[in-house]
Amino acid sequence: MATIELKGVSKEFRINRERSVLALGAMDLTIREGEFIALLGPSGCGKSTILNLVAGLDEPSTGTVTVDGLPPRQLQTKQQLGIAFQEHALLPWRSVEGNLELPFQIAGRKPDREHIAGLIELVGLKGFESARPSQLSGGMRQRVSIARALCLAPKLLLLDEPFGALDAVTRRSMNLELQRIWQEKQITTILVTHTVEEALFLADRVLVMSGRPGRIVREVQVPFPRPRTVETMRQELFHQLVDDLTLSLEPEYKEP
Ligand SMILES: Nc1ncnc2c1ncn2[C@@H]1O[C@H](COP(=O)(O)OP(=O)(O)OP(=O)(O)O)[C@@H](O)[C@H]1O
Ligand SMILES: [Mg+2]
């Protein structure tokens, strides 16, 4: 499993000749092997940027990012990275099944049909194997992209608001599923979410970021034992932590 280390990482984007945007201030962050991290923060604070850096899809402007001591790109080459992007990024001309075959094909492996069928069932899309993305709802597409991220049994799972388009009931059952998968495989996971409840329900540690330039302003170790259930969310302490974290998301929040 993967240990992630960000040291002095900042990211500046050039907009044009005169202007650039400092998306991330210098940040240090260590994520333990098998740890589940939730990232919360206002829109534009650099959450997707962090995922892109950890995935090796972009380079930091300063500092270093390593996964198990190596540049993240190496994990990609070894196909040990599962990503579900904010935009689902499915191939429109391929069926659900075809989209799940893609990671195997990129890796030069024969698609494991049984495993794919299992994943389709896991995300509740049995019967839609041959549907194309345009024939699915937004939430169904998100579920396909989660299944795709899990295809190659990754060491590292990066999830960018994967449940954003789901109704509350489906979202809750996906949360339970994700917890189950994570417990079974202990994949190091970074989940970006806008929902405080979801962060607390799933994560070992919740990180709150400030508005641009993004910095980590708050860190909460989640005290609830696993498996967490619907009961967990009814506890007084759960509600208190939700309130507390919601306050730290406000723009005028001052670090203690
Ligand atoms: N390729 C890019 N070129 C220029 N600016 C960028 C680029 N990618 C991101 N940015 C800028 O960096 C900042 C952080 O963007 P990012 O996508 O990481 O935010 P986010 O926290 O994921 O927001 P959201 O919650 O809306 O998805 C934003 O101000 C954005 O305009
Ligand atoms: Mg984003």
Image: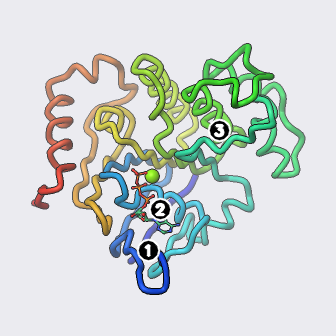
- Residue projecting furthest to the bottom: 17
Disc 3 is placed on an element classified as: helix
Q: In which quadrant is the C terminus drawn?
A: bottom left
The foreground one among 235 and 184 is 235
From the image, state whether disc 1 or disc 3 is nearer to you. Answer: 1
Q: Residue 89 appears at what percent x and percent y?
A: 65, 45
Q: Residue 182 appears at what percent x and percent y?
A: 52, 36
Local crowd at mark 1 within 10 Å, few (<14), some, or many (≥20)? Answer: many
Q: Colour scheme in the image?
A: rainbow
Q: Earlier in the sequence, mark 1 or mark 2?
A: 1
Local crowd at mark 3 within 10 Å, few (<14), some, or many (≥20)? Answer: many
Q: Residue at x 65, y 38 (%)?
A: 150
Q: Which residue is mark 3?
A: 150
Q: Which residue is mark 1?
A: 11
The foreground one among 108 and 138 is 138
From the image, state whether disc 2 or disc 3 is nearer to you. Answer: 2
For residue 101, which quarter of the picture?
Answer: top right
Amino acid carrying mark 1 in the image: Lys
Q: Residue 195 appears at what percent x and percent y?
A: 33, 36
Q: Work out whether 182 lies above or below 205.
A: above
Amino acid carrying mark 3 in the image: Leu
Q: Residue 78 appears at what percent x and percent y?
A: 74, 58
Look at the numbered disc 2 and say if its residue's Cβ is closer than 8 Å to ligand 1: yes
Q: Residue at x 87, y 46 (%)?
A: 109
Q: Which residue is mark 2?
A: 49
The answer to whether mark 2 and mark 3 are in CB contact below 8 A is no
| 151 relative to 44 in the view: left or right | right
Q: Residue at x 24, y 48 (%)?
A: 220
The foreground one among 247 and 223 is 247
